[in-house]
Image (cartoon, rainbow, N blue to C red):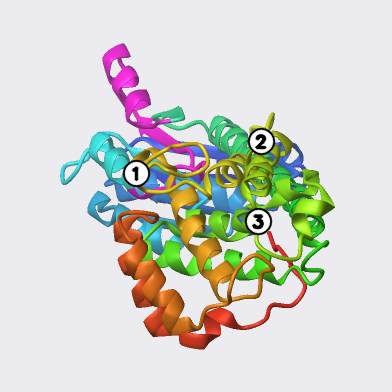
Amino acid sequence: MQGAKKKLVMRHENGRVEGIDYLVIGATRSLMSDLDLSAVKLLLIDDEYTSLKLLGAILTQAGYGKIATTTDPRQAIQLYQEVKPDLIATDMRMPQMDGFEVMRQLTAVIPAEDYVPILVITGELDALTKHKALAEGAKDFLHKPVDATEVVLRIKNQLVTRQLHRQLRMHNEHLEAQVRLRTKVVEQTQLDLLARLALASEYRYDSTGGHAGRVGRIAMLLAEMKGLPSNQVDMIKKTAPLHDVGKVGLLDAVIQKDGPYNAADWEAMKQHTKIGSRLLSDSRAPLLLMAREIALTHHERWDGTGYHLIKDVQIPLAGRIVALADAFDVMTHPRSYKVTLTLSQARAEIEQGAGKQFDPELSDLFLQLIDREGDTLLSPMGPLQLVA
């Protein structure tokens, strides 16, 4: 008959007949035009097959095509893992497992960052039950007998909320990625400047920056042998080359002196640790904090007779590590004020200095490093490059 309203008739177990107005359901479709209903996945849980079929029919007529159902709430977890639904609707009173337990199990497996709304379907909703359901993770309620329009609208509202939640999460992830990228750029720019500063500090006597690069590599290897976390190892690798940055403030007469140093020369040379510390001060950046620490303390001795009379574990670990790396590289490469040692002679020197000049534990590790790496520790380095 033209203009007649179509109805879906469902008979409940108690004999009651309920009609669903298709035109009412159809009118709600315009409200969901912003959602791709064909892609939305729903999971319905109800021990009453008739109620389950009725709810499924309402949602199918509303345009949903991916609807998983079960009359056994014990299958909820398995179905969730298989279907990965966008929304879950569960009955409250079921014999095998009530809705509270279903929600408890579901919230335990649903990722915290994923918003999967759970709707509770019940014919009896006293205040205590409602409060408990909300505490277990329920986002909304559907009353039995269900109203077709209310079902579609409440589900639509929750799906819109899920969509907004996902969009917000994606937006946040995008922002975080942008922040990481910009942080990486800033860090690399900082490292480029630090590398050039390290090169400038040695340019008057080592235009290749080889000493700084070798000290960075040796300090990194020693830090690894010490068992430091990878992030600390990386920081030592990047900051150790700056140990002599304070030499930019020393006179050419000291830096380029041809021959042994006298007492005045050594007093002038000691100033480079303080100059380096001042150059790297007034920053809260972890890299610069460690670089400053190394610049100030890499000439301290374990027995307390170093530049600033700091002793044993009072000397920062990074300073003790770089002290060994720096001393070894200076021993094994030409300097105007000293004789160049062979690898075996440098090894013996470090062994003799353990517990006096150097940290005894680090000295033992360094001897193992020499035995393991051999002449590769003496290998020339290309231009100093620090990579974020």
Task: Say which residue appears at 70% left-offset and 63% top-offset.
Answer: 387
Q: Earlier in the sequence, mark 3 or mark 1?
A: 3
Task: Give coordinates of residue 133: x percent, y percent.
Answer: 33, 26
Q: Contact, CB < 8 Å: mark 3 with mark 1?
A: no
Task: Give coordinates of residue 281: x percent, y percent.
Answer: 68, 33
Task: Give coordinates of residue 374: x percent, y percent.
Answer: 46, 86
| Dot in front, 3 or 2 | 3
Task: Give coordinates of residue 61: x percent, y percent.
Answer: 60, 50
Callout 3: few (<14), some (14-19), or many (20+) C-alpha neighbours within 10 Å?
Answer: some
Callout 1: few (<14), some (14-19), or many (20+) C-alpha neighbours within 10 Å?
Answer: some
Judged from this view, the residue extending furthest toward the top is: 127
Q: Earlier in the sequence, mark 3 or mark 2?
A: 2
Q: Which residue is mark 3?
A: 261
| Dot in front, 2 or 1 | 1
Q: Which residue is mark 2?
A: 24
Q: Which residue is mark 1?
A: 312
Q: CA distance from mark 3 to mark 2?
A: 98 Å
Residue type at numbered disc 1: Asp
Residue type at numbered disc 2: Val
Q: Tell me: residue 38, above or below residue 110.
A: below
